[in-house]
Amino acid sequence: MALSMALAAPMCGQTSLATNAPQGKPLSTRVVDYAIDAKIDTDKKALDATETLTYKNLTGVPLTSFPWHLYLNAFQPESTFTAEEHYQGGVRGDRATDYPAKKMGSVTIAQIDADGYGDLTAAMKYVAPDDGNANDKTVMMLALPKPLAPGDSITFHLRFHDQFPESIARNGYKRDFLMGGQWFPKVGVFWHGAWNCHQYHSTTEFFSDFGTFHVRLTLPQRYVLGATGVPTGDQANSDGTQTLSFYAEDVGDFAWAASPHFEVTTGTFLGSMGPVQIRVLALHAHPKAGARYLKIMQESLAQFDTRYGPYPYKILTVIDPEPDSQIFGMEYPTLFTGGTSWWDPTYGTEVTAEHEFGHQYWYGMVATNEFEDAWLDEGINSYTEVNVMDAIKGSRTSVFQQPWGSASETGVQGLQYVSEPDYDPVVRHAWQFANAGSYGAITYSKTALLLKTLEGIVGRDTMDEAMHVYFMRYRFTHPTTEDFLRTIEEVAIKKGRATGVVGEPGGSTAEPQVGFGGVLLAEKPNVFVGSSLRPYFKQAVYGTAVLDYAVEDVTNGPVKWWVKGSEKPIHSSVTVHRLGDFVLPVTLEVTFADGSKVRELWVPPATEGADGNNRWKTFVYERNAEMVAAEIDPDHTVMLDVDHFNDSYRAEAKGVPARKLTNVWMSGLEAMEQMMGWLV
Amino acid sequence: MLVGGLRLMLGRPGVVVWTYLASLGIALLFSLRMHAQLASLLDHSMAAERLNGAFDLPTAGAVILRMFRHAPSAGATPYLGLPLYFLVYFLLVPGALFCYRAGAPGKLWILFNMGFCFFWRFVRITLLTVVVSGILLAPFFIAQNLWSNHVDEHMVGVASVYALIPGYVVILLVASVLRLYFDLVEVYTVQLDDQYRANGRPDRRVRKALIPAWKALWWNLPRALGTFVLLALVGAAAIFLTGRIAVDMLAQPRVWPAFLLVQAGLFVSLATRFWQRGAETILAGDYLLPAGAVLEDGAELQPRCSAVFYPTPVPVAYAPPAPVPVVPAHPVLVDPLPDPEPPVPPVRRGDSGMFRVPSRESDDIEG
């Protein structure tokens, strides 16, 4: 109550209850206004609720129908979500071989009507725009008897019932913990001239309009509850329940989590837009989690505020979910679930919390379409995760740090990427990936690595500025892939790190055809269509080419080899070999025995054949010292390379790494031998 | 038992040393190809520096991923050593038990000879072990699984771990009792080989060892199980401690300290297993098998496994305990035979080392 009063107290010059926006002005175009009153049955893991949605038609066209997301209906055996998870694997769960009753989830609309339109219950119809699955009930289309004119509003009234499954894909219950995510009928987004309302898939996340939420949740008093937005009321009822009220604005969703075992830890971060209350709801079984979450959130807020822009909301709620559930690590507006355990010697707790917090920016505020452009959320968020965690915990130790070993964010992302590097481009719609493994490797890790590699091309300062400009320009606007890429190009050109390319007005700009060095392909100026970075984007973002350059054929020998006893000068050569399809300029550093070093830059031609050879290049030297080492990418900026072991050659062999791994392997083998011996 | 077992194990160091060398040798042999692959990948690569004076886990992971993707057979080859070691161990254990029982030196040729001789008997024992253990442990695993589900429903964190530990301890204790029992069956099976069946063949019936092993275990359960569990814990602790310290050495730019440390732990662990075997041999020595069968007429004695080394009589490597004086419940009957007894009539045929009940027919008795 004290917290809600503190947050509700108006600050100097501010009138917004939920954000630190100057003068309380809306931060987003508020299309929807939800008012939900729900009674939660914690024993039956269900709820009954009423919902009022006011939708403002800002589309510029008359609307004759409204699609609704009914996400909880995905948790049924016939759904597209379950079929995909069974056949292609899920992001969070194993491939299920049975479907027990406790995994059943549903959202059932008992009645829906609209002011001025009457009862529309009979007009509800399930549709499956993505795969035509007649048994999928995750999208409901509601036809209006008369169109909604542009600029007008419509107010829907619904009664619905939720049955939560035992933890599937970010949702449901585990023991007496209950997660209300994607739990209410939510209208689709009218985007780029049409309704955008995809089915729920095993790999997809979400997309929503911005708006306001007034939510009342009634549940037993022994429960502690955290939710999106700021708490505005706490009423104890005579039947042993409590009714908690929340208000949120300029957000696209509303989620809550409840458990009788939460212990609350609070702290404050003073951001550039105002104070942010950090509220951690950690399980009693994780006694160290509260302090760890709080610390990493304060550090992350500071990093994001400095690098990308301010966090405008007044509150951030961290939920510590039940162990062994699929509810860990999920983002919702001003709230996310972390992931830890009673013993975590790694920085896994911190990495998860930072990652989910990062979504507040890319999913929450920038709010890209996660169905169609998942990389713009998960991928960019993985990239910022690398940079932020490296800054907080060290670039070599950002995931794990012990005296005997370490792990970095970049290393972990690289490992995940090389597991499935070439099935899909990052821009593929999330549900169209080859499988869940490819979705994870490409959407998260390849994006992080391609942006880290871009840092090496345009400079770290350029990327930092580009990310800042992108966030500040596109927050609350649902940008697309090209919006992001063009922002990078624009900043890179401004800073002299790339060459701009202009083109014909109205021409296709999706994949401008330019060569390395910003070769101008269009004759008519005035419209920016790309830059010298386009070949990189075309391969790294739009393509599936794998980047792999190798150092090969290092040789040393006397120039006058036919003269007996001749030793100097020495003829040395090294070949750089492009093994993958990805073409990228290569920096080679050659070291000689006298300590001298030479750096070479090879810019392969964009195409192969009569125009040139972009597969290999041999560098030859005649010196009085032997070549002792050659290394591609000596500054270690090309993180997209799938094999770093062949990036270099050192004449002197060092056997320790191989012996070390063999010893580990062999010791394990001997231990297994002894285990087997217990059978006799 | 503990001290006697230690003496037996230390008195025949060859047993442990040969077994350890077999384990190490097989592991080395089957790791060579993998090491060659690793060396070709890492020896000249500067990216491997992260595994030289440090231990970067993603780099190690990338190596393993590459190994299994580009040279899957090299990565899988080491596992082929497991069945080979199992086979060698199968041959060494009977020899070890024989050496402990008979006082023979733990020489490799003795170990292998005995291993071949007892091979099929130990196969039968192992199969019996697996079947009986499966039957007896299954209810415990089912119960633990149900308990685990219950705990999972209601508890989290370290409390759930504590709640599950007692169940696992019970399972380990039952498994220990079973392992101890079948260890004793193995000891008695080796002992049984010194006896002949009525047809003159050495007694190779594993089932004849079951009841003596059970009696020996039943009458000595606390001290036998205590010794067994204590030594098992010592072995496990040796592996854990040396392994843990070796992990701390991973970042060092040298390998041999970690290698030696881990090998020391593995050796100690193996030694404690044979220490257990020695202690079980001592226990079995306290409870000798009942006398063998009477030879049938015309039965030809066939060679025992031990006959290769000790034709006859079978030497006893330990002093059997003094017989416990029995206090008679009834008045002692006077021995009808005169003291001293008359000499035993000579047997016409058969093994001079065997006592044979003389026939009542007069033509079997000379004079």
Image: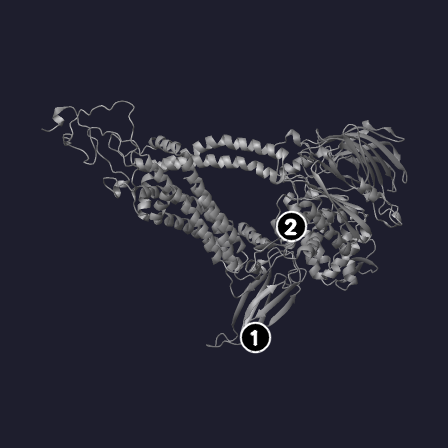
Left or right, A283 with reference to A529: left
Q: Residue B336: where, in percent of width, then height?
A: 18, 24
Q: Quadrant of the C terminus of chain A?
A: top left
Dot 1 amino acid type:
Arg
- Which disc, if any, is residue A334? none
Q: Viewer-proximal residue, B317 or A319?
A: B317
Choose the circle earlier in sequence order: 2 or 1: 2
Callout 1 crowding tier (Cα within 10 Å): few <14, some 14–19, many ≥20 = some
Which residue is drawn at the image coordinates 77% and 53% (left, top)?
Answer: A484
**Element at label 2:** loop
For label 2, the residue is A347
The structure's colour scheme is: one colour
Dot 2 amino acid type:
Tyr
Q: Residue B119: where, in percent of width, then height?
A: 35, 39
For label 1, the residue is A623
- The quarter holding residue B183 reads top left
**Element at label 1:** strand
Q: How many marks?
A: 2
Left or right, A659 with reference to A533: left
- Whether residue B74 appears in this view of the structure is no
Left or right, A338 with reference to A575: right
* Relative height, residue A177 to residue B12 (above, below): above
Give the foreground label among 2 and 1: 2
Name the chain under label 1: A
Q: Are marks 2 and 1 in contact (CB under 8 Å)?
A: no
Q: Residue A663: where, in percent of width, then height?
A: 49, 54
